[in-house]
């Protein structure tokens, strides 16, 4: 098999676009492993594919990701149990768990916590207010120190005046 | 990039966005295939989109009039045959065998036209 001829045959282009048959795809993957020229040509074609896509790229609206996230969350939500009336059968002896199994494990495996996005504004407000209060505290501290100094100076002056 | 690709096919922004959301929802089922070692994620994502669209009304595209009226600089440089082959495969996921039968040509000629289309793209970029 002449590899140059194979590369020039258009088989790689067909594979990259997903239009090659299964047999052709298997053959190509085999050649890709065996011949670095095929691997390189395939890589260049994939770069071309990205280039074509970039030429027509459009930024999705910010709501698109939210929709995807919501739908995925919907998919992984457990199905709600249907409500059924309680059937009173013959009374069974109540099962009691052994003492060591009577506790509910409350510690989650993950260290992450999910919170509503609205909280970010609350955190931002708390942060900004914190900075403002800190600024005021520093300002009043300096003011107070200044006043204290002036008071001390005045006391000294008064003492000096009295002594005269 | 995927939204632009979908828009070229469906020509309706809202529908393209709907398809984008639907395609992304199927990604967890194909995550190994898309993020595998030595795999080009974009090509796999595009293949996934093509497979998804093949199950919709956009799959039936025998007429050239339905080809995307693409504004990208590459397709404008191709001749009719290259354009038809490239668009049928790139946008509608047709196999070379299918296309050879439709156009009454050999598979080798289809692959040759496809290769020429790629050469034009490479030269233009």
Image (cartoon, helix red, strand yellow):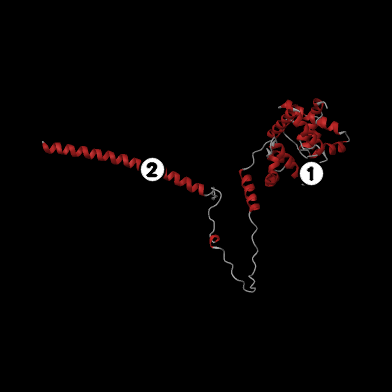
Tag 1 secondary structure: helix
Q: Is residue B108 above or below residue B60?
A: above
State which chain disc 1 sits on: B
Task: Give the camera-side residue of B123 and A22.
Answer: A22
Tag 2 secondary structure: helix
Neighbor class of circle 1 (other Cα within 10 Å; few <14, some 14-19, many 20+) is some
Q: Is residue B46 above or below residue A2?
A: below
Q: How many marks?
A: 2
| Residue B18 in sight | no
What percent of the width, then of the height, locates residue B8? 73, 39
Task: Give the camera-side residue of A37 and B105.
Answer: A37
- Do the numbered discs 1 and 2 sit on residues whose CB atoms are within 8 Å? no
Mark 2 lies on residue: A134
Q: Is residue B63 above or below residue A36?
A: below
* Residue A54: quadrant of the picture: top right
The residue at the point 83 percent across, 36 percent down is B96
Residue B112 shows which numbered tag?
none
- The C terminus of chain A sits in image quarter: top left
- The N terminus of chain A sits in image quarter: top right
């Amino acid at each position: 098999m002449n590899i140059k001829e194979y590369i020039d045959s258009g088989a790689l282009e067909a594979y990259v676009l997903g239009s090659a048959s299964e047999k052709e795809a298997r053959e190509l993957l085999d050649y890709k492993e065996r011949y670095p020229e095929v691997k390189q040509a395939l890589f260049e074609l994939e770069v071309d594919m990205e280039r074509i896509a970039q030429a027509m790229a459009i930024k999705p609206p910010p709501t698109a990701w939210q929709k995807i996230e919501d739908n995925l969350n919907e998919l992984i939500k457990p199905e709600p149990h249907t409500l059924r009336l309680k059937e009173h059968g013959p009374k069974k002896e109540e099962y009691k768990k052994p003492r060591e199994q009577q506790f509910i494990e409350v510690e989650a495996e993950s260290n992450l916590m999910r919170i509503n996005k609205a909280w970010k504004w609350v955190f931002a407000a708390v942060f900004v207010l914190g900075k403002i209060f800190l600024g005021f505290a520093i300002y009043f501290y300096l003011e107070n120190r200044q006043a204290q100094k002036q008071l001390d100076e005045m006391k000294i002056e008064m003492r000096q005046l009295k002594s005269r | 990039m995927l939204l632009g690709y979908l828009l070229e096919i469906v020509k309706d922004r809202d529908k393209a966005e709907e398809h984008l959301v639907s395609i992304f929802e199927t990604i967890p089922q194909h995550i190994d295939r898309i993020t595998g070692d030595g795999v080009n994620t974009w090509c796999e994502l595009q293949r996934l989109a093509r497979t998804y669209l093949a199950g919709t009304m956009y799959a039936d595209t025998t007429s050239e009039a339905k080809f995307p009226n693409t504004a990208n600089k590459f397709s404008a440089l191709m001749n009719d045959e290259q354009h038809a082959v490239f668009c049928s495969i790139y946008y509608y996921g047709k196999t070379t065998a299918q296309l050879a039968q439709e156009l009454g040509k050999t598979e080798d000629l289809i692959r040759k036209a496809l290769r020429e289309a790629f050469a034009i793209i490479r030269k233009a970029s």
